[in-house]
Image: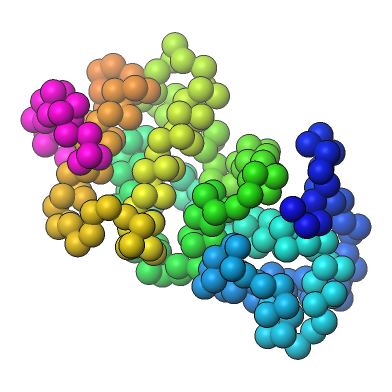
């Protein structure tokens, strides 16, 4: 890819940019703001650095001077986008008091509402997670692991300290499991809202989506939850669902 080192060990060149002066930093911020909307509207591969420069009235080379490449620009856009999201423990106090799985429920049911509030950063996060090339994706994964922008590690510790999560499982394994499952499930909800053509089930009733959320949380609670299971909203309905039903109809998930 243009502007990225081919050595798989060496970091891409866009990660080795010199520190910016205040005036230069202000220009970088303007570029990132414009690029965020452009990437969100056009996608990663169709986005053109020249179009971003034209919209800002600056030279295309100025963007490369600041970010090294299109990939370097998107990486900065992605970081700004995910840093704008709330952390898990930013849920209201009464929700946190209700427990770990209630917090998960809170964020899942609010997914579509958050998208409507500001769809651009969520679109950027989806592009970074699923619509970029391998080298850039590796840097995104490294950033997510190092910075933990959603506060997943602190959230898992919260659940362990409350006795709601298993204490016979390594905490890092629980963090990874949530990364693999919860965030992917939420991404599916985001994809349904932002790109209906990419989602198999269009126009489904809210009750069906609510039931799917409850089923997902029941499966997640069974995997990492401590016994006895912590009650979560809709727990009564979840317990009425026979395990064989969940297995027999995987497409409902």
Q: Is residue 9 left or right of residue 131?
A: right
- At x 42%, y 42%, the residue is 184
- At x 83%, y 39%, the residue is 7
Is 247 in the magenta? yes
Q: Quadrant of residue 246?
A: top left
Say if 197 sits above or below 236 in the image.
Answer: below
Q: Is residue 19 left or right of residue 228?
A: right
Q: Quadrant of residue 82?
A: bottom right
Viewer-nearest residue: 44 or 1: 1
Relative image position of residue 99 (x, y in whole percent): 34, 35
Relative image position of residue 137 (x, y in whole percent): 63, 46
Q: How many marks?
A: 0
Relative image position of residue 55 (x, y in whole percent): 68, 85
Magenta stretch, residue numbers: 232-253
- At x 21%, y 50%, the residue is 209
What kind of secondary structure does the magenta stretch mostly adopt?
Answer: helix
Is 29 in the magenta? no
Instruction: Residue 110: tell me if it is visible.
Output: no
């Amino acid at each position: 890819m243009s502007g990225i080192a081919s050595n798989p060990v060496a970091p891409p060149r866009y990660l080795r940019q010199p520190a910016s002066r205040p005036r230069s930093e202000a220009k970088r911020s303007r570029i990132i703001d414009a690029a965020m909307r452009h990437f969100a509207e056009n996608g990663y591969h169709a986005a053109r650095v020249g179009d971003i420069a034209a919209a800002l009235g600056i030279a295309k080379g100025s963007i490369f001077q600041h970010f090294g490449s299109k990939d370097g620009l998107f990486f900065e856009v992605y970081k700004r986008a995910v840093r704008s999201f709330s952390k898990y423990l930013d849920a209201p106090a009464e929700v946190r008091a209700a427990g770990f799985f209630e917090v998960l429920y809170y964020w899942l049911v609010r997914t579509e509402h958050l998208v409507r509030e500001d769809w651009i950063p969520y679109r950027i996060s989806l592009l970074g997670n699923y619509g970029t090339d391998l080298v850039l994706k590796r840097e995104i994964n490294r950033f997510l692991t190092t910075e933990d922008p959603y506060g997943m590690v602190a959230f898992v510790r919260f659940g362990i300290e409350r006795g709601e999560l298993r204490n016979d499982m390594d905490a890092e394994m629980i963090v990874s499991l949530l990364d693999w499952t919860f965030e992917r499930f939420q991404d599916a909800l985001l994809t349904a809202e932002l790109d209906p053509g990419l989602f198999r089930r269009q126009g489904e009733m809210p009750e069906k989506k609510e039931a799917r959320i409850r089923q997902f949380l029941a499966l997640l609670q069974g995997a990492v939850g401590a016994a006895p299971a912590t009650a979560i909203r809709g727990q009564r309905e979840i317990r009425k669902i026979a395990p064989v039903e969940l297995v027999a109809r995987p497409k409902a998930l």
